[in-house]
Image: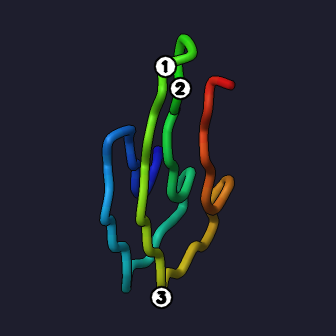
Amino acid sequence: DDCISIQSGCSNIRIHNINCGPGHGISIGGLGRDNTRACVSNVTVRDIVLQGTLTGVRIKTWQ
């Protein structure tokens, strides 16, 4: 599963100093299902170790 999952409506997210894996990594979404408007803003990621993750970081949309 996701190490971190960020969904629509989230803002001002700070992710730092973590070890992530194994798994899917960091996921944002799924955004915009059924042509809806979805917003995620101001996401900061730093000092992260991704080891054995499927995708590292993924932004999932329905578009």
SS for callout 1:
loop
| Disc on res. 36 | 1
44 versus 11 height, above or below: below
Please name the residue that numbered disc 3 is placed on. 47
What's the amino acid at mark 1? Thr
CA distance for labels 2 and 3 = 29 Å
**Left or right for 30, reference 11:** right
Mark nearest the camera among 1 and 3 is: 1
SS for callout 2:
loop
Question: Mark 2: few, some, or many residues within 10 Å (few <14, many ≥20)?
Answer: some
**Left or right for 60, reference 16:** right
Residue 19 locus on image (x, y percent): 44, 77
Image quarter (top left, top right, bottom left or bottom right) of the C terminus = top right
Return the residue found at the far top: 34
Residue 62 locus on image (x, y percent): 63, 24
Q: Earlier in the sequence, mark 1 or mark 3?
A: 1
CA distance for labels 1 and 2 = 5 Å
Mark nearest the camera among 2 and 3 is: 2
CA distance for labels 1 and 3 = 33 Å
Label 2–label 3 contact, CB within 8 A: no
- Residue in front for this viewpoint, 1 or 62: 62
What's the amino acid at mark 2? Gly
Name which residue lies at 49% across and 81% down. 48
Label 1–label 2 contact, CB within 8 A: yes
| Disc on res. 32 | 2
Residue 8 locus on image (x, y percent): 38, 38
Name which residue lies at 47% across and 84% down. 46
